[in-house]
Amino acid sequence: MPRDSAARRIGAVVWPSFFAAGVATMVFFAIVDPLDLAAITWPQVRISRQAGYTIGFFMFWLCTFSACLFTALLVAPPLPDDTPREPL
């Protein structure tokens, strides 16, 4: 059975994580205003509402990308030259 191309594997991790981050961002910021969140967390730093949305999106994307990447690593088929090893 041939292995998938690298572009297909990368797309299978990046695209779902991007989509999930977009949905999570919309849901989170429908409830929480970025300026209120910034005032609570970093009152000395002034950021715009758009910067808050951007930072939030990339934080959600990092989390969902990590989850998708870990899943892809777990379900990847073994390489053909792998031999079964004795349990520890």
Image (tube, helix red, strand yellow):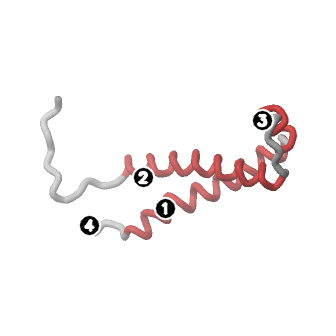
> What residue did someone put label 3 on?
42
* Circles 2 and 4: CB atoms closer than 8 Å: no
Looking at the image, which residue is at 30% across and 55% down?
Answer: 77
Q: Residue at x 84, y 36 (%)?
A: 39
The circle on residue 72 is 2
Viewer-closest of 53 and 69:
53
State the CA–CA distance, disc 3 to disc 4: 52 Å
The amino acid pointed to by label 4 is Met
Type of amino acid at the residue the image marks with label 1? Ala
Q: Amino acid at mark 3?
A: Trp
Which class describes the residues within 10 Å of circle 2: few (<14), some (14-19), or many (20+)?
some
Marks 2 and 1 close (CB-CB < 8 Å)? yes
Q: Which one is earlier in the sequence, the residue at label 3 or at label 4?
A: 4
Task: Count residues near mark 1 (Cα–Cα under 10 Å), then give few for <14, some for 14-19, many for 20+.
Answer: some
> Alpha carbon of mark 2 to alpha carbon of mark 4: how far?
18 Å
Q: Quadrant of the N terminus?
A: bottom left
* Residue for badge 4: 1
CA separation in Å, label 3 and label 2: 35 Å
Q: Position of residue 8 (x, y in %)?
A: 44, 68
Give the secondary structure at mark 1: helix
Residue tagged by mark 1? 12
